Amino acid sequence: MAEEAPTVNLLDLSAAAVACTVSASRTIMKIGNPDGEKNVRTKTDGSFVTDADVAAQFIIVKALRTISQAVHIIGEESQEEMEQLKKDYDFLDNDILKRTRQEFYLRRDSETPTETETTHLPLGITGQSPQLPAEPTFDDDAVIVDASRVCVVVDPLDGTKSYTQGEYDVVSILIAIIVDNTPVFGVIGKPFGYTGYNPIYGTKCVTFYGGPLMDGVYVAGGKQVEEAVVNSNEEGLITEDLPRAVISSSRSKGVVQDFCVHMGEKGLVYPEPLLISGAGEKSLRLVLHQKNEAIWFFPKPGTAIWDVAAPDALLRALGGKLTDKYGKEMDYSRHRDDFENVDGVVACVDEKLHDRCIELFQVGDWLERR
């Protein structure tokens, strides 16, 4: 009799993805403190890597493997690096995992908590929560799938260059769960905290999670993130409430800067883009849209699938869209060695604004510019 194909519970896997950001954050902070040893080195592609990158990925992979040995995991750092650095890291805080599962139960199976009740969510800063099952189960057919359909994409420390320089605000942990090449759940963790948001109970880590699987985006222990309201003005009037583009502070010249100015002239965005480092930080700015951040435009090589997978899941749940410069969805089935997004990335909190940007980019000689 043939063995049944292994399955995985997507919510259990998602809970582990949220919980392990705490353990990874602790190690990232420890290595990043003045007494820590980052051991900065350069990869063959010229990017930086530190012991914190490798240790964080080791922690995340080990935590995910407690849920499933069968799902495919793609991480930015190599298996060889992880094996060389292998240490006795605390890879999963079981109390945080239990609280995450309880919070998922509240989000999915109970009425949405009111604003006053969010201070009593299981991952909230007080650590207090309503009476909940100690170990809630998620056993509906929709969340149990063949493990062969699932891939987890991990960027254990996005913003490594900033991390090596002691600039920790832009550092992020990115984890995405992909089913049949579609991102269904994403996590953006901020190891050093995030201004205006409370950290997970008993930690300094602020985490945002969600996607189509959760039918929304949430602050861990806090409120649901609201969808953005985008106010483009194609009559060309420049107003303060126009959406803002976010572009890389180190790679803002050429077609990136020029096309953002062009979109501004068309009234699609405010003519002066915000210069932001780190793919995770740029994506989080879109998700939270506190300063009308609405579009991340980078139509050329320089990002990887692990930079965009988690943001893709979050934006899908907020009515947004993430594609390459031609408007094609990302292919997350690629081999790890084929990681680069050679046709760039265009991410937006609003699908209509995204499509208008793609349409405008096809006109003239923009596609040939660098």
Image: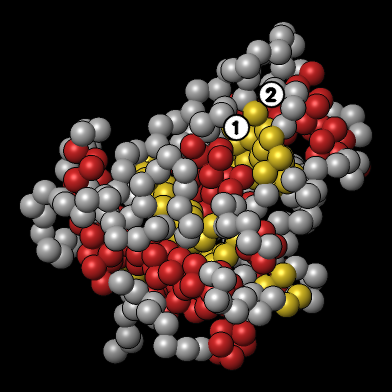
**Residue at 67% in and 59% down:** 162
Against 186, is 274 above or below?
Answer: above
Q: Quadrant of the C terminus?
A: top right
Dot 2: within a 10 Å radius of its alpha carbon, few (fewer than 14), some, or many (20 or more) residues? Answer: many
What residue would you read off at disc 1? 294
Against 360, is 326 above or below?
Answer: below
Q: Are circles 2 and 1 on residues that touch, CB within 8 Å?
A: yes
Q: How many marks?
A: 2
In three-dimensional space, the C-alpha distance between marks 2 and 1, rounded to whole angstroms, equals 8 Å
Which is nearer the eye, 10 or 32?
Answer: 32
Rendered image: mark on residue 269:
2
Q: Quadrant of the N terminus?
A: bottom left
Q: Secondary structure at mark 2?
A: loop
Q: Is residue 189 left or right of residue 245?
A: left
Q: Position of residue 199 (x, y in %)?
A: 36, 52
Q: Position of residue 97 (x, y in %)?
A: 28, 66
The way the protein has been coloured in the rendering is secondary structure
Q: Position of residue 129 (x, y in %)?
A: 15, 50
Camera sees residue 220? yes
Q: Position of residue 167 (x, y in %)?
A: 63, 56
